[in-house]
């Protein structure tokens, strides 16, 4: 599974990272790298929950920054 991370920057300087194909997977960070790290960790938790509930058959998971 490949997931695209979309980034945006708030007026206060915070970064937002979102994986639009996984609803609710959104994270803030004081740097772009921090936001990316947090959103990847959250995505992995969501995917793990889906696999555990047998809602997904994820093989390899890859992330790509947009």
Image: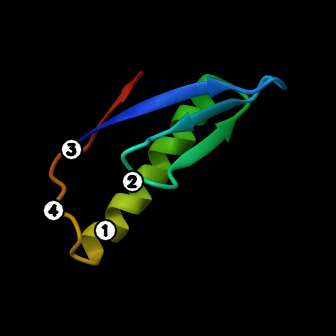
Quarter of the view holding residue 52: bottom left
* Residue at the far bottom in the pictured view: 53
Point out which mark residue 44 bears.
2
For the residues labelled 3 and 4, the Cα–Cα distance comes to: 9 Å
Residue at 56%, 35% (x, y): give it. Answer: 17
**Mark 4 vs 2, N-terminal side:** 2
For the residues labelled 3 and 1, the Cα–Cα distance comes to: 13 Å
**Mark 3 vs 4, N-terminal side:** 3
**Mark 2 vs 1, N-terminal side:** 2
Quarter of the view holding residue 58: bottom left
Q: How is the image coloured?
A: rainbow
**Mark 3 vs 1, N-terminal side:** 3
Where is the C terminus found, in terms of image quarters?
Answer: top left
**Tag 4 secondary structure:** loop
Residue at 21%, 64% (x, y): give it. Answer: 56
Nearer to us: label 2 or label 1: 1
**Tag 2 secondary structure:** helix
Point out which mark residue 50 bears.
1
**Tag 3 secondary structure:** loop
Residue 40 in the image, given as x and y percentages of width and height: 45, 43
**Mark 4 vs 1, N-terminal side:** 1
- Residue where numbered disc 4 is placed: 57
- Residue where numbered disc 3 is placed: 1
Vertical arrangement, residue 35 with respect to residue 25, above or below: above
Residue 33 in the image, given as x and y percentages of width and height: 57, 26
For the residues labelled 4 and 2, the Cα–Cα distance comes to: 13 Å
Verify CB contact (< 8 Å) between mark 3 and mark 1.
no
**34 horizontally vs 43: left or right:** right
Verify CB contact (< 8 Å) between mark 4 and mark 1.
no
* Residue at the far right in the pictured view: 12
């Amino acid at each position: 599974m490949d997931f695209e991370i979309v980034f945006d920057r708030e007026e206060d300087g915070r970064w937002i990272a979102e994986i639009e194909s996984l609803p609710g997977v959104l994270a803030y960070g004081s740097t772009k790298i921090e936001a990316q790290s947090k959103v990847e960790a959250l995505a992995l938790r969501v995917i793990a929950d889906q696999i555990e509930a047998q809602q997904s058959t994820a093989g390899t998971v890859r992330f790509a920054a947009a």
